[in-house]
Image: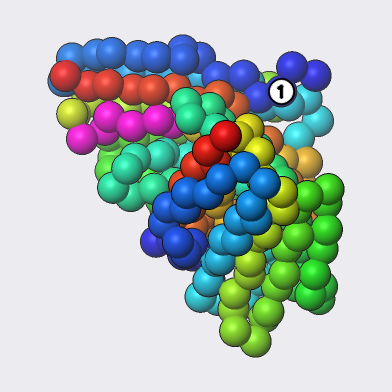
Amino acid sequence: SQQGEEDPQALSIQEGENATMNCSYKTSINNLQWYRQNSGRGLVHLILIRSNEREKHSGRLRVTLDTSKKSSSLLITASRAADTASYFCATGTDKLIFGTGTRLQVFP
Amino acid sequence: DAGVIQSPRHEVTEMGQEVTLRCKPISGHDYLFWYRQTMMRGLELLIYFNNNVPIDDSGMPEDRFSAKMPNASFSTLKIQPSEPRDSAVYFCASSLASWVMNTEAFFGQGTRLTVV
């Protein structure tokens, strides 16, 4: 069974706009990770946030974590067409379980 | 390192045939994972190994599926006999340590399996 559920399932925006994706999970975690998957490719790790962290930045990415609500958000600022991909959150303790993903389409 | 290498990239087989998917993890990584991705079920963890030993195979759907890791640099996922509902993209991933140690997973490019 899946641990994380992303919201929205799909998101379409224009270049330059910000994209926000949300993830909810069910059980306690050690960390939460976000991955990107381009069409027909494998998943690529973007960022990891530990359970004792509330916010983390990496370039144009900003991740927040609220363990009391069992939720996380991924913000991509100033989006580019190259950001078009599916984004997954993943959580777990002994094994990493992925959510359902958000399909992001960025139009030039 | 070339990353996680999977072969073949595409496999088309007839129902009832045996299928073997292969994976070479990143050198030095102690953990290896097999995932299956479909539109209906998303990414499912099938099995994972630690130091070549299977730790959790609770995600393996049926006895038709088996996985081995004879050494630190090679793993196989076998389906025998294959069925059309096994059609999916199968990913292998490896990591340096367990998720408890806050490490990331590195994925291969996947094998797209089509069973007709």
Residue type at the position of mark 1:
Gly
Q: How is the image coloured?
A: rainbow
| Residue designated by label 1 | B3
- Taking B97 as reference, is B111 left or right? left
Asked if residue A66 is positioned above or below residue B44 in the image, the reply reads below
Residues B51 and A12: in front is A12
Residue drawn 75% across the image and 72% down it: A51
Asked if residue A103 is positioned above or below residue A29 in the image, the reply reads above
Q: In which quarter of the image is residue B106?
A: top right
Look at the image and say whether residue B87 sits in the magenta stretch: yes
Q: Residue A31: horizontal and vertical position, in percent?
A: 71, 65
- Taking A51 as reference, is B34 left or right? left
Q: Residue A86: horizontal and vertical position, in percent?
A: 51, 43
Quadrant of the rendering where the C terminus of chain A is positioned? top right
Q: Which chain carries label 1?
A: B
Q: In which quarter of the image is residue A89?
A: bottom right
Q: Residue furthest bottom?
A: A68
Q: Residues within 10 Å of mark 1 (few under 14, many from 20)?
A: some
Residue drawn 83% across the image and 48% down it: A59
Residue drawn 73% across the image and 63% down it: A63
Question: What are the residue bounds of the magenta stretch?
Answer: B85-90
Does the image show residue B103?
Answer: no
Look at the image and say whether residue A46 sits in the magenta stretch: no
Q: Residue B75: horizontal and vertical position, in percent?
A: 56, 25
